[in-house]
Amino acid sequence: MKTKSRRDSIRKRKHIEEKYSWDRLSDSSDERRSYKARALIAIVIVISLFLVYATKLYKVQVSNHEYYSVKSDSNRIKIRPIQATRGIIYDRKGNILADNISTFNLVVKKELISDKKDFLDKLGKLVNLDKNMTKSINNQYKNRRLKDITIIEDITLDGYSKIAVDKYILPIIELSPKSKRRYMSPEAIAHVMGYVGKVSDTDIESSVVKIHEGMTEIGKLGVERFYQNILSGQPGFEKLETDARGEVIRVLEKRESIRGKDIVLTIDLDLQNFIYERVKEKEGAVIVMNPNNGDILAFVSFPGYDINLFTKSISTKQYSTLLNDIRKPLINRVTSGQYPPGSTLKPFIGMIALEQGIIDENKLVNCDGAYELDNHSRPFRCWNKEGHGNANLSYALTQSCDVFFYRVAQLTGIDLISEHLYKYGFGQKTYIDLYGEKTGLVPDRKWKSKAKQEPWYPGETLNVGIGQGYFLATPMQLTLATASLAKDGNTYTPHFLFGDKNNKTSELSIYDYENNKFSTQVKDSHHLDIVKKAMWRVVNDRGVGTASRLKKVKNIEFAGKTGTAQVYNLDKGKTGTKRLQDHALFISYAPFESPEIVVTVVVENGGGGSSTAAPIARDIIEYYMDNKPTSVSMYE
Amino acid sequence: MSDYIGGRRKPFSGLSALLYIDAKLVIPIIIITILGLVTIFSSSSGNLDLVIKQLTRITIGIIAMIFIAQVNPDNLKLFAPILYIFTLLLLGLVLIFGVGNSADRWLDLYFIRFQPSELMKILVPLMLATFYADKPLPPKISYIFVAILIVLVPVVMIMKQPDLGTALLIGMSGAITILLAGMSFKFFLGSIISAASLLPILWINMHQYQKQRILTFFNPESDPLGSGYHLMQSKIALGSGGFFGKGFFNGTQSKLGFVPEHSTDFIFTAFGEEFGYLGVIILMSLYLFIALRGLSISIKSTDNFGRILTGTLSLTIFLYVLVNVGMVIGFLPVVGAPLPFMSYGGTSMVTLFATLGIIMSIKSHQRILRK
């Protein structure tokens, strides 16, 4: 067997050697030459292609190096902002009005969820999963742009520890810390503080706020907005190298954030809360201001709203509830509410007439309950149908006689009235440190022809004389004008800012109110005495003054003026019957001899100034006087 | 007529003579594989495991190369038809039992997994060269048709896998063989026209993802996050490398994962990012040198079999380089073709070394013209 196979293999090899024997091979020189030609063509093609590639690579790597370098860096380098701690806001006594608290967001990286159903089951053991949460998780899970799912926002420290204990059930979840703004007495102080929210396009376009790179939150309204640039500080950043999945590889560069400055406000939180508790069922505005320096001690626009709702993402439903609330809590009535001041304008009309020499203190006007004007079929009525008889200025103010002021207004004329009302600050902004302040309206001939394309009618002058008609003022303007009376023509720009603190030394640099002093020349201080005395009589001339039935405030006397503004020509029939009632107003200052506070009260549809507004002002003055020792600023 | 003597080793001396290898081919190849190892090490952020695995493959490849270099070309000729038919059968098996991701190209033999299509990269030129060996060149037209058939059968089977990239590469290497063997100008023109007319049929038979890749190639912006993304990131990597490169281990695009497949199909990109235009040109020149060396061997060959085979194989290696580099710089669609001797991967490394072995075998076994 063995020899046979060997023989076979030898035979096979022999056969192969025969077939391919060297001798039988031939190589014609023709074939060699023609192959060489083709190979040379191939060489030329190979070298040309090499050159084409080398050129293309040169274009990519050398000519466009710069362009691709930038692209490469933006691929791998991500900038992560480090938010600056926002300054804390204190009231004048050192109470915290707004600070920052640490909260946690419960988040999970999408890529870590392997089985969504299992994930939701385990999550359900950890937290109370309601329908909305499940829906929100599902939505975020589907959104391809999101890498993380936020399960719950703003978990407090308590909630944090509860979840942290059970975290072993679902180790992939993370509690990521964040800082959140917190307001004390959020409703009472809503319109002073405003709130903080996410930076929007309108913020970026705004010229009053400085947007730093990486800033995510910004003051939206109120003091938070006005002092945004002081409070916000400056965000820092981390320059991170990340891989294609966005995972951080290392920190390339880091700049710490700069903390915002703390600020102290002139507000007295206790007074503010006292007032808010007193009025929160109504709608209107209350201001307490120190006429000696413009400090605003209380600034209440009621009803307020919970500004803490706005610091997390407020739901559309909650927002529209606030927006559509018939009581309009979102409106800042103190600086944006424009009201006819009614009789509270009379002291100023009286002052103008005295100063211009139109009347003197003895000028008498006979009031029989109505005042007839030529070419007017209907007489102008006094609130007292019986009439006031012969009245001089002091009596007319004390009794708030309308006929007297019809007459005086007619004598003075609209030109003089409007010119001098401007001097009290009506018709222009008070320049309080808030944005969005309204100017009110001091009507005159020019305004009338421009706005209504009509000439000025004499009857309209009479209406302005009693603070009605076209005339509109904000409660803030009324306060400033009252301060001007109380302080003999010297006023200070109303302000919330007491001072701001140095970050390192905590030293308070106090706001310089003297720089914002304005003086109106008073021709004869006796004129002021007449009007002020009349305002004293309003409160203190028992049985005569419109507010004289008020309970006395212990140890001090104050002066004031009631006002009842008729509003049927404001929003005629738009709302229910309640809306057609008169606005109640009261301006006052206390103590009478050396004024420390000016108190203005406006209650919308509150009825009479003496019955609704004056008692509120009286209680405020009493509270202020009782708590005066503690009302002194810790910084004073 | 018999001008040749049966000389074998006589004209050569030293180690290369002993092992039948060609130093002028081996040295640039060794440099390229080292560059490949360096790039794999860097772009995998220093993963030595990958480097050792690749080194093992290179070693196996070199052993295979030396082994094949010992084989007399006549024996290659003898076994070519058997190997060719055997591999066709394997391709058939892959179509039936293949394993792999989206494309079933792998054959799992329990102890080893390999791609029969890779073997075809050598066997098609070998089979064609064998077919042409005893025929006068340029061949008759009927022979050309047989040659085309030898190429098309495996190409169609590989396309069915579906592996369009490899199928096209093998088709092109077949075309190179047929062109090197020579033909009349008229026939050349005619075949180009008929090949062009076949393109629509090819398009209809392509898979959706293959069509997508080609569409993306012509309009990369249409799909910035899909296949266009690979190309864009590849260009960013190369371009950010600049003239001198970011330096060894400093590449960010590949290391941070922006360049996909940075050790396999896109290894050229990873290399170019770290070593810049300078490195890239040196690398390309090494490949060019190998191609020219191969062509020079083919011109000096003393029979048609040797000429056609060495010529085709060296041009094919260069073709692979052009296809891979063309893909990463946006000249060609992304088809999934490795860079010879550099890309991480086993089958391709071994077959390429085997290719070199064949070239060396022909070079060192050639007969010397009798003076």
Image (tube, coloured by chain):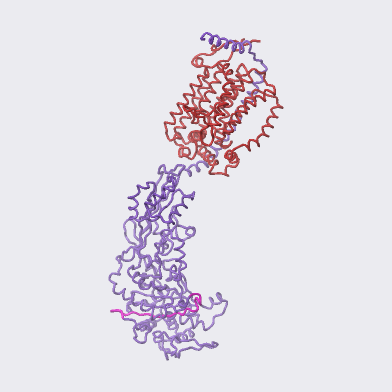
Residue A174: image location, x then y, percent: 38, 49
Using residue A630 as the reference point, say whether residue A51 is left or right of it. Answer: right
Number of numbered markers: 0
Looking at the rendering, in which quadrant would you find the N terminus of chain B? top right
Frontmost residue, B248 versus A197: A197
Q: In which quarter of the image is residue B316?
A: top right
Residue A530's place in the image compared with B189, above or below, is below
Q: Main secondary structure of the magenta part?
A: loop
Using residue B80 as the reference point, say whether residue A428 is left or right of it. Answer: left
Looking at the rendering, in which quadrant would you find the C terminus of chain B? top right
Q: The red chain is which one?
A: B
> What range is drawn magenta here?
A552-575
Q: Residue at x 48, y 33 (%)?
A: B263
Residue A270: image location, x then y, percent: 32, 69
Residue B22: image location, x then y, percent: 53, 19
Using residue A523 as the reference point, say whether residue A379 is left or right of it. Answer: right
Using residue B191 as the reference point, say whether residue A138 is left or right of it. Answer: left
Residue B204's place in the image compared with A264, above or below, is above
Frontmost residue, B341 versus A554: B341
Q: Can residue B295 be seen from the camera position used here? A: no
Color of chain A here? Answer: purple
Q: Can residue A272 be seen from the camera position used here? A: yes
Whether the magenta-drawn stretch holds residue A337 is answered as: no
Residue B251: image location, x then y, percent: 46, 37
Whether the magenta-drawn stretch holds residue A569 is answered as: yes
In the rendered image, the residue lying farthest to the right is B186
In the rendered image, the residue lying farthest to the front is A1
